[in-house]
């Protein structure tokens, strides 16, 4: 795996969110939300649709500025930084809807994660003899991640032609190729077949275990939550309703009633 | 024979323009309607520097390139706050500003009277006067631009642009700064558009603002829509089609009374058919949205 050969060592990072509020007009999407995603652990955010989970990811990822509150990465306030700056602080975000670059090949999709500012200088742009080695290196590293998710044989196909499940795997590979210290996974198994869900869960488990990734997970599939989550926050109507271990949250009668009632027969 | 060389020069000039616009339109996904503005700025920079200051070609060409790059950088900061239709409008606005300035700043540009007597390039006392010689000269410039754009279009920078074009939000989550990359693209695109400007001014030896209108910018965008964009082949196919087809239509023996109108109709119909049946153009890699 690339993590063993990469000389850069990414230290584990803790993510904290303090008193975040965000309103859209009169609608309070998030109200005074505070939570901690602990070092090297998987923290799941669960709750009915409209609870504010994805909005919270948007705030953490820099896509939305909160009205009040702070996002703190390893003790540094990163609130309001644009998404690309958050990404450069080793935060990898997997979107709910698959967002591969459809016109790029599968391998190129991964290569984008390896681009560094030094790759854009005028000198690198026109001095082809200086960039060949780097290109080969990017390709090799991309192939390693493609092998990891099982898409190596599709490397030169346009990403837009992959199946939905394969696109999700590609999106995951693209994010972990960034060498993140924190993973924000927004419904990684939504709309996947049972077999694909199993594969995705196994990959996430392996990544978290091998690389000590601090992971925040939004998920409606309670089977997946039970398998992955170390700690759970239950969000309801923009606030943290309950938090605790799996047992504490999933067996909480109030949670069962709110979640079951609102999400229409969701198995918990 | 000079007629063929003239077509060759025009192919070279529009080839360079198409390649310059391709970086923004085909790689960045930013439909610009301001390419003729940079083309015009390059032409005027060459004309004024060589006529008023008597500077030689090897100084005026880089000066024109730098001027366009700088203006592109300035304009990029303003226009790249917008995307999609709003960006298109911003580029149209810029195109109009440049045109109106060239038209009305009569003390400098002589406005609608244009600038005549622009010198042909000369090297070591050897002027490039005949049309065949000028064709060869254009070929050299075109080859240089083609080589440069090939390097840019295969660079990591182009990869990041394509990622932004396909999904800006996703590209940002991989650490790519949209504004920085787009401004870079604008600078490269503007700088390259100066070269055909210089080439045109020194070839025709007369320029006025009507050569650098919005219609010209739209024509350049059409070359990319027809030929395709997002690679090097597409713009080349587009230029060949858009420049050669009208010339071929001169020889199909249409009755004189309606020839001009019929040619336009045939030309128009072919454009519509191509854009309708081939969203990526004749040889492109990207369907302009």
Image (spheres, coloured by chain):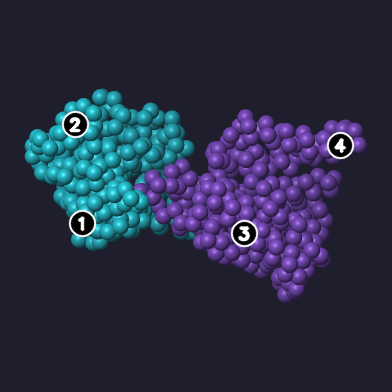
Q: Which mark is residue A260?
A: 2
Which residue position holds label 3?
Answer: B94
Q: Residue at x 81, y 37 (%)?
A: B263
Q: Outermost residue, front direction?
A: A26
Label 1, label 3: how far apart the Cα atoms are: 44 Å
Label 3, label 4: how far apart the Cα atoms are: 36 Å
Label 4, label 2: how far apart the Cα atoms are: 75 Å
Q: SS for tag 4? A: helix
**Number of residue marks:** 4
Task: Identify the colour of chain A in the image.
Answer: cyan
Q: Which chain is purple?
A: B
- Of labels 3 and 4, earlier in sequence is 3
Residues flagged by tags 1 and 4 on a common chain: no
Circle 1 crowding by C-alpha within 10 Å: few under 14, some 14–19, many from 20 = some
Q: Residue at x 31, y 52 (%)?
A: A23
Q: Would you say the residues marked 3 and 4 are in contact, meaning their CB atoms lie under 8 Å apart?
A: no
Mark 3 or 4: the one toward you: 3
Mark 1 or 3: the one toward you: 1
Give the x, y percent position of residue B41.
Answer: 67, 62
Q: SS for tag 2? A: helix
Quadrant where the N terminus of chain B lies? top right
Q: Would you say the residues marked 1 and 3 are in contact, meaning their CB atoms lie under 8 Å apart?
A: no
Label 2, label 3: how far apart the Cα atoms are: 56 Å
Q: SS for tag 3? A: helix
Chain letter for the residue marked with disc 3 in the picture: B
Mark 4 or 2: the one toward you: 2
Which residue position holds label 1?
Answer: A18
């Amino acid at each position: 795996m690339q993590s063993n050969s990469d000389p850069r060592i990414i230290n584990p990072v803790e993510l904290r969110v303090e008193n975040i509020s965000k309103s859209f007009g009169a609608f309070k999407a998030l109200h005074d939300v505070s939570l901690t995603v602990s070092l090297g652990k998987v923290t799941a955010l669960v709750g009915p649709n409209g609870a504010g989970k994805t909005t919270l990811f948007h705030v953490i990822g820099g896509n939305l500025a909160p009205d009040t509150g702070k996002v703190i990465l390893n003790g540094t306030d990163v609130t309001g930084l644009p998404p690309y700056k958050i990404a450069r602080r080793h935060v990898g975000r997997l979107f709910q809807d698959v967002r591969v670059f459809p016109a790029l090949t599968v391998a190129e999709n991964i290569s984008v994660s390896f681009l560094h500012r030094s790759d854009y200088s005028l000198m690198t742009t026109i001095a082809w003899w200086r960039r060949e080695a780097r290109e080969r290196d990017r390709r090799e590293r991309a192939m390693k991640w493609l092998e990891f998710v099982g898409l190596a044989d599709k490397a030169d196909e346009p990403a837009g032609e992959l199946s939905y499940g394969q696109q999700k795997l590609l999106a995951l590979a693209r994010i972990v190729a960034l060498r993140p210290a924190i993973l924000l996974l927004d419904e990684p198994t939504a709309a996947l077949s049972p077999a694909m869900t199993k594969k995705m869960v196994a990959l996430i488990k392996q990544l978290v275990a091998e690389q000590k990734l601090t992971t925040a997970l939004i998920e409606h599939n309670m089977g997946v939550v039970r398998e992955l989550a170390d700690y759970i926050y239950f969000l309801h109507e923009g606030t943290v309703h309950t938090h605790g271990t799996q047992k504490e949250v999933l067996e909480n009668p109030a949670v069962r009633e709110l979640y079951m009632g609102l999400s229409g027969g969701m198995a918990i | 024979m000079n007629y063929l060389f003239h077509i060759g020069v025009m192919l070279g000039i529009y080839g360079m323009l198409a390649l310059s616009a391709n970086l923004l339109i085909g790689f960045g996904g930013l439909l610009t309607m301001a390419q003729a503005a940079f083309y015009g700025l390059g032409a005027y920079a060459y004309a004024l520097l060589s006529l008023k200051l008597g500077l030689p070609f090897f100084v005026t060409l880089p000066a024109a390139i730098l001027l366009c790059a700088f203006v592109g950088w300035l304009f990029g900061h303003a226009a790249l706050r917008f995307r999609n239709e709003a960006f298109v409008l911003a580029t149209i606005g810029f195109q109009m500003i440049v045109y109106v300035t060239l038209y009305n700043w009569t003390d400098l540009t002589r406005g609608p009277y244009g600038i005549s007597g622009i010198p042909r390039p000369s090297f070591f006392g050897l002027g490039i006067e005949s049309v065949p010689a000028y064709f060869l000269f254009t070929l050299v410039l075109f080859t240089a631009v083609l080589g440069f754009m090939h390097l840019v279009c295969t660079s990591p920078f182009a990869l990041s642009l394509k990622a932004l074009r396909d999904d800006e939000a996703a590209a940002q989550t991989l650490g790519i700064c949209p504004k920085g990359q787009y401004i870079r693209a604008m600078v490269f695109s503007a700088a390259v558009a100066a070269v055909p400007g210089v080439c045109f001014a020194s070839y025709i030896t007369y320029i006025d603002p009507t050569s650098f209108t919005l219609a010209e910018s739209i024509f350049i965008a059409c070359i990319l829509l027809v030929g395709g964009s997002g690679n090097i082949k597409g713009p080349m196919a587009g230029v060949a089609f858009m420049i050669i087809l009208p010339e071929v239509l001169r020889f199909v023996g249409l009755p004189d009374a309606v020839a001009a109108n019929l040619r336009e109709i045939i030309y128009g119909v072919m454009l519509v058919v191509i854009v309708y049946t081939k969203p990526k153009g004749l040889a492109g890699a990207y369907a302009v949205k």
